[in-house]
Amino acid sequence: MPYDAVLFWFRRDLRCDDNAGLFAALQQARAVHCVFVFDSEILEKLTQRRDRRVEFVWHSVRDLQRDLRALGGDLYVLHGAAQELIPRLAIQLGVGAVFINHDYEPTAIRRDDRVQAALGASGVALHTFKDQVVFEKNEVLTQAGKPYSVFTPYKNAWLAQVNAF
C-alpha cells in the first residue's frame, strides 16, 4: 500500500457505499481517517439563521458518522474554514494524502486549489476522483473535440457512450 494513513474528506458525498474517493482511499492506505467540515465560509453567506439545507446536511452527517462507526471507523466533524482545517488536520494526523471526490462549483474549485497548495507545502498529496457524475465535462465532446452547444446532439452522444458500457 502506498500510504500508512490518509484522510478522506467528505463533502457532497455523504455516504459509505458507492463512493469513488473513499474506495480509493481504502485501497491505498492501511488507515483511513474521515472528516466532514461545516465550512464557515459557506455558512456565513446564508441569509437565514435556520436553513433547511443545513439541517438536512447535519442529519446526513450524523447518519454518516453512525454508519462509519458501525463499520469500525469514525468521522471528525469540524466547523470553520475548510481551507485551513483540512491541512491542519492532515498534519496533526500525520497522513500522506487527502482523498476527495471532485466538486464542480467555482468556489469549491478555488477552495480545493488553496487546500492543495497548503497540503503540498507540507508534503501531503491531494487525490481527487470522479464520483457524482457519469461523465466529466471533457468526456462527451463533438467530433471536433469541443463541448456541445445544442442539447439533442449532446444527449445522443451521451447515450451512445453510456450504451457502450
Image (spheres, grey):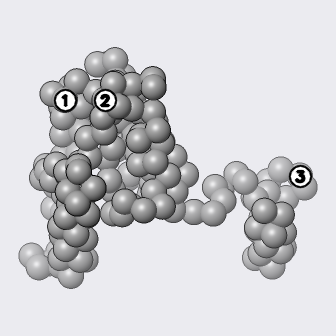
Marks 1, 3: nearer the viewer: 1
View extreme (left): residue: 49
User: How far, Cα to Cα, is label 1 from label 2?
Assistant: 8 Å
Element class at badge 2: strand
Residue 61 seen in this snapshot: no
**What is the crowding at mark 2: few (fewer than 14 residues within 10 Å), some, or many (at least 20)?**
many
Q: Earlier in the sequence, mark 1 or mark 3?
A: 1
At label 3, which amino acid type do we have? Ala
Q: Which residue is mark 3?
A: 144
Q: Nearer the viewer, residue 144 or 11?
A: 11
Residue 37 vs 160, above or below: the answer is above
User: How far, Cα to Cα, is label 1 from label 3?
Assistant: 47 Å
Residue 105 seen in this snapshot: yes
Q: Which residue is mark 1?
A: 93
At label 2, which amino acid type do we have? Ala
User: How far, Cα to Cα, is label 2 from label 3?
Assistant: 43 Å
Taking 49 as reference, is 10 left or right? Answer: right
Marks 1, 2: nearer the viewer: 2
Q: Position of residue 99 (x, y in %)?
A: 40, 40
Q: Which residue is mark 2?
A: 5
Q: Earlier in the sequence, mark 1 or mark 2?
A: 2
Q: Nearer the viewer, residue 154 or 134?
A: 134
* Mark 1–mark 3 CB contact (< 8 Å): no
Taking 1 as reference, is 133 left or right? Answer: right
**What is the crowding at mark 3: few (fewer than 14 residues within 10 Å), some, or many (at least 20)?**
few
